[in-house]
Image (cartoon, grey):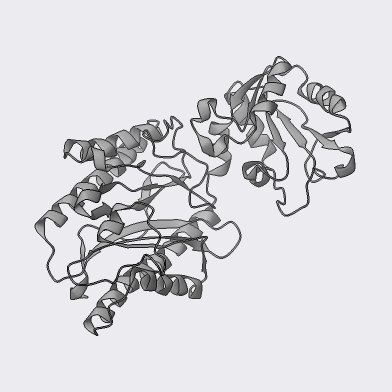
Amino acid sequence: MELQKIQASLQEMNLDGWLFYDFHNRDAIAARILNINKNKFASRRWFYFIPAVGTPVKLVHRIETAQLDHLPGDKLIYLPWQEQHANIQKMLGSAKKVAMQYSPNNNIPYVSIVDGGTVELIRSFGVEVISSADLVSQFESYLTEEDRLSHFEAGDIMQMVKNEAFAEIARRIKSGNNPTEYEIQKYMQNMMRTNGMTFMDGPIVAVNEHAADPHFEPTAENTFIMKEGDLVLIDLWAKLDRERSCYYDITWMGYIGTEVPEKITNILQIAFNARDAAYNYVSDKFAAGEDVRGCDVDDVCRKVIVDAGYGHAFTHRTGHNIAEEVHGNGTHIDNLETMDERFIIKGSCFSIEPGIYLKDEKIGFRTEIDVFIDDNGKAHVAGDVQREIIKIMNL
């Protein structure tokens, strides 16, 4: 835990402290920031208060008194709920404004973890509860040098897997053994595991109308057999199978043929233009030393697609934070599903992935890159950036 940095941030934000609370290992954010083992048995509520100035205080149940012993600070112990309430007031002291994993109106659900009743309890003591969203972004999404290297190393592997997947489609169709979406997914999964990657699900391999479903998941039952003239979307994400590694997440498009229909080329180019507009906006803003909000980047990207007449078909946010989780807890590139007004911080990584989904026409398009902002405010993209659709039968 970075106590001094946390307290410095609390002072900068004019907060009296950060109050952590958990029950049954529900708060993964608290676990990572406080270095708590989520696999350790925890059946009782605990609180940990980091004041802006002074010594932290921990509050634990009498039958789990060692729950927070690895953390610095004074210890209070409770048994009956009345004693718990009294000790919460004692640990907060004169604090009037504290951060918790709470989001007004659930605007940022990634940090909306503390239950409403607990928030009500803290407010009943005359304490204002402020969202910890900006603190979480700072202490959850900042990537160390080791984290960054793991992202770029994962990128090399995932770009190779993507290339091999398109080549495998070509090989099998040329041999008369047309693959299914599901078979190519399994091929990619095996290749990722062989190369030391780990992932929870995916990748997405989607043909034609399946590509018009942003979260299509191929199964043995719903899969299509690929054939010439099909549009293919591949979205893959994974990280190195080691501690504190960072995810890599990209989407590429291919066409099973030697030439691509003009309409497909033109629509995908709109998505490319939107992606590049968002990237350039971020890069230029950081180069000028200006703050960049996630919601504003979404607006820039979305405007390109809206102006091209496809605004109705861009049905998700522009991107998400990337860290140890593929959808991290830092700033998201979103002014659609939520209004993420948090600033993108130096040292963080996020995706830019505009999509155009035309269900009536049974086609869908998406392009995705991962953007990393270094400590000097320079924007980087790990790996190749797709500039034109892959002509699969030319591979």
Residue 85 appears anywhere in the view:
yes
Quick check: 91 left or right of 387? right
Quick check: 6 left or right of 196? right
In the rendering, at what x and y percent does residue 192 appear?
A: 46, 70
Q: Give the residue at the far bottom of this rendering.
A: 175
Establish if 91 lies above or below 262.
above
In the rendering, at what x and y percent does residue 287 appear?
A: 34, 38
Q: Give the residue at the far front of this rendering.
A: 221
In the rendering, at what x and y percent does residue 356 appear?
A: 25, 47
Quick check: 10 left or right of 321? right
Q: How many labels does the image show?
A: 0
Q: Which residue is drawn at 75% across and 34% down?
A: 48
Q: Which residue is drawn at 20% across and 59% down?
A: 388
Quick check: 98 left or right of 353? right
- Could you say which is closer to the camera, residue 17 or residue 219? 219
Q: Which residue is drawn at 51% across and 46% down?
A: 328
Give the quarter of the figure containing the N terminus. top right
Tell me which corner region of the image, top left, top right, bottom left or bottom right, holds residue 44.
top right
Q: Residue at x 71, y 22 (%)?
A: 122
In the rendering, at what x and y percent does residue 26 appear?
A: 67, 43
Give the quarter of the figure containing the C terminus. bottom left
Residue 289 appears anywhere in the view:
no
Establish if 380 lies above or below 53.
below
- Could you say which is closer to the camera, residue 376 or residue 295? 295
Tell me which corner region of the image, top left, top right, bottom left or bottom right, holds residue 265.
bottom left
